[in-house]
Amino acid sequence: MRARTQVQTTINGETVEFLCEPRQSLLECLRDELGLTGAKEGCNDGNCGACTVVLDGRIVNSCLVLGVEAAGSEITTIEGIARGAELHPVQQAFLEQAALQCGFCTPGFVVASKALLDEEPNPSQERIRLWLANNLCRCTGYDKIVRAVEQAAAQLHKVKA
Amino acid sequence: MKTQTEASTDTEIGGREYAVVGTRPIRHDGTDKVTGRAQYGADLRMAGLLHGCIVRSPYAHARIRRIDAAKAAALPGVKAVVTAADLPAAGDRIVDLGEGATPLSYIRGNILAGEKVLYKGHAVAAVAAVSPHVAEEAAGLIDVEYEPLPCVLTAPEAMQAGAPILHDDLRTEEFGKRAAGASNVAQHFRHSLGDIEKGFREADVIVEREFRTATVHQGYIEPHNATALWNHDGRVHIWCSTQGAFVVRDTTACILDIPVSQVKVTPMEIGGGFGGKIPVYLEPVAALLSKKTGRPVKIVMSRKDVFEGTGPTPGSYIKVKIGARKDGRITAAQAYLAYEAGAYPGAMVAPGAMCIFAAYDLENVVIDGFDVVVNKPSTAAYRAPGATNAAFAAETVVDEIAEKLGIDPIDFRLRNAAKEGTRRADGPRHRRIGCVEVLEAMKRHPHYTAPLGGPHRGRGVAVGFWFNVGLPSSCTISVNADGTVSLVEGSTDIGGTRTSVAMQAAEVLGIAAEDVRPTVVDTDSVGYTAVTGGSRVTFSTGLAAYEAAQDVVRQMKERAAKLWEIGVEQVRAERGVFCAGDRRISFQELAARLEETGGPVIGRGAVNPKGVGGSFAGCIADVEVDPETGKVSVLRFTSVQDAGKAIHPSYVEGQMQGGSVQGIGWALHEEYYMSPEGAMLNASLLDYRMPTSLDLPPIETVIVEVPNPGHPFGARGVGEASIVPPPAALANAIYRAAGVRLNSLPMKPSAVMEAIWSAKA
Amino acid sequence: MAIVYIPTPLVPLTGGNATVEVEGATVRQIIDNLERSWPGIRERLIVEDHLRPNISVAVDGEISPLGLLERVSPASEVHFVAAISGGSNG
């Protein structure tokens, strides 16, 4: 076994430590070392977005980040999106709009969509489609996903107003 | 968006007011799926887990001379290596494991190659180690000596005399007769009706065209996975993402030559399938590795493995010739379909032949179909397998004829439309179908007459058919004391079916959908259930749930009768309330009194139904073709489909949208880009170009409801037909936008430009 | 009597007749009776006492899950079609 590095980082608001080999991606560390299996591997080369997490305020493909690079960072995964006992409006909207079929891409989409709405409260449909273009879905054809994001935007806007 | 739902005027089954069927409850597994809690196959964690990696052939066709695993076995952390030598011999057995009857040697050979490798990516050996990285390193250390052989990559080439032969023992079969001499053609069939020569003589216009379609992949986002534990008591437990847990059980038991009762399969959540997760690849290998190591072994495919080592859908070569009179009546239709099966026989050419002209009432037809092996991965089903290739050919020829006759393309189809009683080319008559209703809904839709709004734009239409299947399903329902019920079924849920099944039970019981708790369980816990495929779950498993619920109602009536001390014939059940005279008790209240009236109430349903209803789908597509780059933008897309009765309209819409978008990707971008040596050069999600959200407009949907008399709520399977017409509709749209008819898929920018330049020259 | 539609490649075996009227209460009886009139056809449809692996039977337009055991009425149409089983054909 190769020498492992100790990494300390903040995940979903909590300080976390794990050991990893330098060659392990952040995605592998989340899933295999920390048991956070919500982020998925679809391609392992940054082309499907199923592994999307927020890293220091930006969404990234966690398969393209090394575990050791995450030291000292703040990470949000799908497991950290719900607000306590309540689903986030994005999650609720995905359910109400039936914006998932197999659900495998859903964690990536939820994280990416929330990141969009955190930055831009009222995105146009084109803006939503552009923002989400790195997240592949093979089941839905994206139509209901876009509607879910629009619904969540309206819901969040209502709450703020 | 409100979907338009157009109910037929039939009021025998359709048109009834339902309390649950037709509503849009939140799916029961939704919370876990939006929070990342749902457990897919690769998420499984277990004490002592080892990780497996498959060694794959770099050659498209080669003899295996020698496999030397010494260096791999010596790597620290490596626990076991297996090859085909570790599998029991298959002999001559023919097995039906949910994919149609196949020689066991083919299934075995595809799982771990025997004497020859038949495609690049063909599995040759497997290794188990303490981590996925060590397993991958070890796989690279396994030394395989190959003797490369010439390869053949398309059906027409493989059918020629002198082509490299894949299987020395393969003979062309035709209804039980085997031709002499080794061949790459596994099967030939011919359907004919009437007198084709006479039909063409009567035609005023005849169009004959050739078509080629490239190999495409189902493209599910979740790679294949399997975890196996060959336990010390001899029982093998498998966890995997599959479309059919019972198929995995039966295939694994068969391959390993152990009794079926020794294998238990727990289906995990599944991240897409579309037919591609019906074949078995990893489970027997993981089981063998587990047997050797005494530990559980998990194998997860890489994306490259998925492209190179699983079954895409056949590429094809198709010829279609259609003749019609001036008045628009088709007088003759002929098709020649040569489909690539990949390395082992079994291309879905027969379903393609069943569907190619299914929308038309024809007197004179001939269809020839050929199942041809080539040195590519062994093909698997992909959503309405075979039909999309066929429709691309037929529906563009129909479009061309309609244009030559000056008839609107939808009107032309209406003049020839199949109806109940129309005889199909393969013989049987259509039962109740919604072809005309779908065409009329397309014609009525505002999209059909909306202005295109710019230059280089065009609109195309096409229709398609999928027959759907029945097959066995089982279900049990137990009543809980609080008035909810637990529903146990065996159809792995890829698109929300546990909810559509639960809704049907809820309708019968007279309770809310939320009060049914559906679970999809392992092969020890529910009766035999066939694959999630063939658009069968809402129909068949729904029927099993319906029967189980009826069984519960019967028993509940008896309990009410007991409570009221009357005969059961006096008790009526109506929408969740049991009554006799002026006495009433609700399902919920009665559920609280089961213990005192005789104990648990459990209902059962087990079906292998007839009464399957086929589904017609049509689409209208607007495109803009960039005259300088050949890029085709889809501006507007409307999908119309006959669902019989939409049990959960949101998920019916979802199937229509998903199938449409797969059809769009198939039409415009996707292909296995092969080198002459048989290597897929674009085996990544960057270069295998599936549609993104940015590539697409909203997908509008219209659900037509022509009830299926064979189902209590009129349901037809809807999962597949929507993928059938889009490539043809887009080809027809591109023609109107750019003046060129493309006869090859994908219609990528380079192909469009070459067609435009040829037309100018 | 039921009408059996003979698959195109087998029409030479039934003297060029594309349809044949046959008596029988089940598909098995139909095939056995067909064989009496047209020897040689049974082995093209049946192997080891069940329908050949890639063949299904459709009675009155519906694929029968019961195969040879399916009941046939005097007014039925019987077709032999490509086997559609499992989701591999779906």
Image (cartoon, coloured by chain):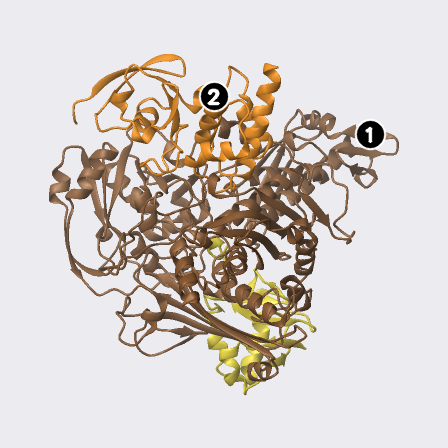
Chain C rendered in what hue? yellow
Residue B529 visible here:
no
Does label 1 lie on the same chain as label 2?
Answer: no
Residue type of the residue flagged with mark 1: Arg
In this rendering, which labeled residue sits more in front, label 2 or label 1? 2
- Residue shown at 21%/25% (left/top)? A22
Q: Position of residue B357 (x, y in %)?
A: 57, 67
Amino acid, disc 2: Glu
> Any mark on residue C34, and which?
none
Is A80 displayed left or right of B484 in the figure?
A: left
Quadrant of the rendered image containing residue B574: top right
Q: Dot 1, how many residues are within 10 Å of its Cα: few (below 14), some (14-19), or many (20+)? A: some
Q: Position of residue B441 (x, y in %)?
A: 69, 54
Residue B313 coordinates in the image, percent (x, y): 41, 56
Q: Quadrant of the C terminus of chain A?
A: top right
Residue B324 seen: yes
- Mark 2 falls on what kind of element? helix
Q: Which residue is mark 2?
A: A119
The colour of chain A is orange
Q: Residue at x 34, y 46 (%)?
A: B687
Looking at the image, residue A24 lies above or below residue B174: above
Instruction: Examine the image and state in which quarter residue B91 appears.
Output: bottom left
Q: Chain of mark 2?
A: A
Vertical relation: B244 (above or below) B120:
above
**For the view shown, which residue lies furthest in the right direction?**
B582
In the picture of the structure, the residue carrying the numbered disc 1 is B584
Q: Which chain is brown?
A: B
User: Compared to C7, does B242 lie above or below?
Assistant: above
Q: Position of residue B627 (x, y in %)?
A: 45, 54
Tally of numbered tags: 2
Q: Are marks 2 and 1 in contact (CB under 8 Å)?
A: no
Q: Residue at x 25, y 34 (%)?
A: B132
